Amino acid sequence: MDGIHDLGGKQGYGPIEVDEAEVPFHHDWEAREWGISRSARVPGINIDWWRHCRELIMPEDYLSRPYFDSWAQTDFATYINVGIISMQEVVSGKALPGQFNINQPPPVLTPQQAIQEDHDNATRFDSEIDTSPVFSIGQQVITSRHGHDCHTRLPQYVRGRCGTVHDYNGAHIFPDLSSLGEETYQHLYTIVFEGSELWPGSEGRNDKIYLDLWESYLVVK
Amino acid sequence: MDGIHDLGGKQGYGPIEVDEAEVPFHHDWEAREWGISRSARVPGINIDWWRHCRELIMPEDYLSRPYFDSWAQTDFATYINVGIISMQEVVSGKALPGQFNINQPPPVLTPQQAIQEDHDNATRFDSEIDTSPVFSIGQQVITSRHGHDCHTRLPQYVRGRCGTVHDYNGAHIFPDLSSLGEETYQHLYTIVFEGSELWPGSEGRNDKIYLDLWESYLVVK
Amino acid sequence: MPEFDSKKVAQIHQHLHSHLPSDSALRVKALETLLVDKRLVDPRTIDAWVEAYSEEIGPKRGARVIARAWSDPDYKRRLMDNAPAAIDELGYLGTATAHLKVVENTDKIHNLVVCTLCSCYPFSILGIAPAWYKAAAYRSRVVRDPRGVLAEFGVSIEDETEVRVWDSTAELRYLVLPRRPPGTGHMNEEELAGLVTRNSMIGTDRELAGDAGSKI
Amino acid sequence: MPEFDSKKVAQIHQHLHSHLPSDSALRVKALETLLVDKRLVDPRTIDAWVEAYSEEIGPKRGARVIARAWSDPDYKRRLMDNAPAAIDELGYLGTATAHLKVVENTDKIHNLVVCTLCSCYPFSILGIAPAWYKAAAYRSRVVRDPRGVLAEFGVSIEDETEVRVWDSTAELRYLVLPRRPPGTGHMNEEELAGLVTRNSMIGTDRELAGDAGSKI
């Protein structure tokens, strides 16, 4: 979707807070949300669907609320969507009788076990597929002119642009369908674009932009 | 600029408030801002510069604050920028001694005089120019692929797209330069685009989109 | 004179974000207070403009233009050829209508007006634009999915009907000439004007009722 | 299982906009309360993850990887060839690094990492991403004006130097291998790791000091 999340090249967002203190969490609630996101998973909510649900946050909230707050809101939305939390419970702020809950207590981890689980979370997203890659390294390609209404990882700023295949990364799960619950794989390339192909007034600036793009985002030049 | 104001085709903005009461003003402050915008003009602040200043509002404010509120903020910004209002005065909420003010009292209008002035405000933005129009009605054209960092009236959703000249409207003041204080004129065309040229999944929908575009936004197909 | 420096204005907006009160009424009050104190405007003049746009300048003007076009083929011809001159026959030329164009609905064509980049609107014949016209939802969606937007307004459009969306990117402004409802041959201009809805002149209404009282 | 229905989720977000408290801490507290009540998570497990990412998993890991690559040409070769395997020699494989790639700075090349669409980050070697990395300003600007962004971070880049921006649009993640500062030939790995800044591994820092204490 051409949503508010697709920020590459958009203008008017002001200065960067370069002097931020270098700490993992700036507020306790950020740490809590991080911990929740690591440990309270729900079957069927894959990363692409979750990302799409984050993209669907109202644009004014997406821009004005802090980052981990948007994670909490996305968690709420995905849990509500599958029926684990009800809007009634959101309003009342507590779990209500007769609603979803689980009999068995959840696992209790120590920090050392969390570190081990983090290690085990090194999920791979690639897979062998039957077809051969259409494009080869060094080849010129053009990206699709259009996105579509659902989740996609082809940003607006590289649509309909000419680039070169910089690398081939095997076949990876295709997010546009994964976010709809369908597990399919496509060849994934790293495509390099000259800055001047993307941005007005950037001729001669010696900037290159690299994106990892799936095969169906590309056409032969 | 590729700012938050460039909304055509962006997704995620939710339903339209179709049941809004049909009244000119929903709040008294909206009416006051309208009246201010009609009567408290300042030399040198042309419509294109004012529009650009509105585009420069922080994106989260642009989306979350009511429409006429953004007019008030743009008025503040333009007045502050030319030195008529100081940030100190914004903070204190009143005019401070030693700052800008005018000796002569401002004109006092009756409603009937305001209606007459509205009639006199039928500003024309066109002018004769020496060159002939490059494009003719019925001709196919392609729009520029790029915008630029300043004010422009070529929306993102029609960049690098193929359209047809539907009408010629004479030479109009060119907003991209007018917003920088330069009064130049360019031929202005109405260009029609097939919906399917602009939007994924809209093939066969029989939608046409018309935009008024200046000559330098266009190249021959 | 401004310096036309975008960066400075962007910074001013950031400061205003911090320093202006968050309530819209207080913000506008603060602006009016400063401008009045600095003699840039007289509050009675603000009153006068509010009254002009509350009572006299509004969609009733547009409706009278439409009714005349329905009643008088010569007027309609002049309106289609040169809308600013034609509306000024009724005295309605004014703010933002010097480059007005009229686009006509037919059985096979439906017209719809938007301004995706800001919220341009033909003030002197339609008055203050509805809030939805100025909101992100309408501005973003109507060029991409005009039929979906029309459905939200309760207007269903046959697949064969061509939908024409007019994005007001320049100083041209657009007024939709809706179709005259059937069974209204006996009506005079004033009665006909009473059938014209504001939304039908923007294009978010299509089938006008032939028997209703004043809509505006 | 979700129905994967975007419209429903968009509506849920609109309801949440009205029904959730506006304070972020209260929102997260409400989420934790519900999830704990429903036995979807134990608060001690949340504590454990917070501690893991506060103490152990963070940019110190990345710095040790960089220091080893500087010290050991064979390790560097393995790191450039197969970063996930190489970081796991140190036990640092984990969340979001199974498809890690390392991009090397040289005198003629500077690398910079972003995720314009969300905020993908190689958690298991750099920990929690800085707030600026996740903010609209960085995400929007760095692909369009990387040199301007670098200047804002105090990094000036010669015109001849090629700037490479890596937008993490897939599950690949990028780690910048900064240049080893001159005059550090005598340092051991631990000392070298102390020179590596977090930002240098994202690409918003370039010239590392050869004589400083721990930066991370």
Image: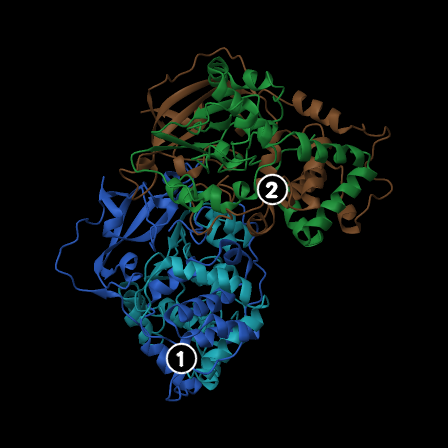
Chain colours: A brown, B blue, C cyan, D green
Q: Which mark is residue D7?
A: 2
In the rendered image of this protein, does residue D19 appear above or below residue C27?
above
In the rendered image of this protein, does residue D9 appear above or below residue C113?
above
Q: CA distance from mark 1 to mark 2?
A: 52 Å
Relative image position of residue D6 (x, y in whole percent): 60, 39
Type of the residue with mark 1 = Phe
| Residue visible at 35% across and 63% down in the picture | B49
Mark 1 nearby-residue class (10 Å; few <14, some 14–19, many ≥20): few
Relative image position of residue D28 (x, y in whole percent): 72, 45
Relative image position of residue B130 (x, y in whole percent): 12, 60
Numbered disc 1: secondary structure: loop
| Residue D155 sits in quarter | top left
Residue A7 is at least partly visible in this image: no
Type of the residue with mark 2 = Lys
| Residue visible at 33% across and 47% down in the picture | B147
Residue at the disc numbered 1:
B100
Observer-nearest of A145 and C174? A145
| Residue visible at 79% across and 42% down in the picture | D34
Relative image position of residue A128 (x, y in whole percent): 53, 12
